[in-house]
Amino acid sequence: MQGPGEFVSGQVRSVREKVDQLAGTVAAEAQQVSAVRSQVGEYIREQRNAARVSLRELARTAGVSNPYLSQVERGLRKPSAEILAAIARGLKISAESLYEQAGMLDRRAGNPDTVAAIRSDEHLSERHRAVLLELYETYVREHAATGGTAAADAPSTTQDHPAGAPPAPHPSKESA
């Protein structure tokens, strides 16, 4: 039979092991959250630089302070959904793209470059972007379910090429 001192020592050792285990889990989760913050901040900075908008100008249009926006870009602050939406408006990009970067929304299926191109097309309204993204995602899902390739699966119709004529060449800079 154990004495009271041995019993307490065993309990203390068990608690210490559990605390060490939980501390490791918390540290790993903290690193993950920090990585997401850094990722959304880097994305905001990239979009701001691409739009040639200064930090001060974006902060003003988004309704946040310069230091706060700087901290968001450096991954020191985690912005709320409302702040992300205001930043997106200031950058004239989809709030959905910032929500995805921040881990608030699941990423869309398909090629990230295609999704980014649709989102960044300034000639499209927000509604048009949303519809195109939905159509693209539906195509990608259906395409993945059939397991085919785009070129092999695309049916050739006589509407596209009347009387079996080859497709017209795409205009290039050389022929212009």
Image (cartoon, grey):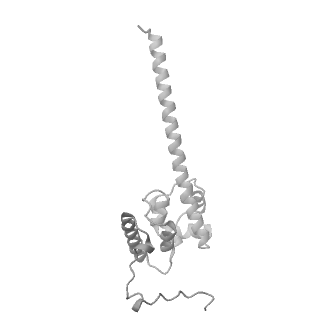
Q: Nearer the viewer, residue 109 or 1?
A: 109
Q: Residue 98 at what x, y percent from top left? A: 49, 63
Q: Nearer the viewer, residue 79 or 26?
A: 26
Q: Nearer the viewer, residue 161 or 1?
A: 161
Q: Please determine whether, in this image, residue 114 is positioned above or below residue 172.
A: above
Q: Please determine whether, in this image, residue 76 is positioned above or below residue 98.
A: above
Q: Residue at x 51, y 49 (%)?
A: 33
Q: Residue 63 at what x, y percent from top left? A: 52, 66
Quarter of the figure with the C terminus: bottom right
Q: Residue 144 at what x, y percent from top left? A: 39, 64
Q: Residue 156 at what x, y percent from top left? A: 39, 82
Q: Residue at x 59, y 66 (%)?
A: 46
In which quarter of the view is residue 39 placed?
A: bottom right
In which quarter of the view is residue 160 placed?
A: bottom left
In which quarter of the view is residue 174 placed?
A: bottom right
The answer to whether 174 appears left or right of 64 in the picture is right
Q: Please determine whether, in this image, residue 12 is positioned above or below residue 25.
A: above
Quarter of the figure with the N terminus: top left
How many discs appear?
0
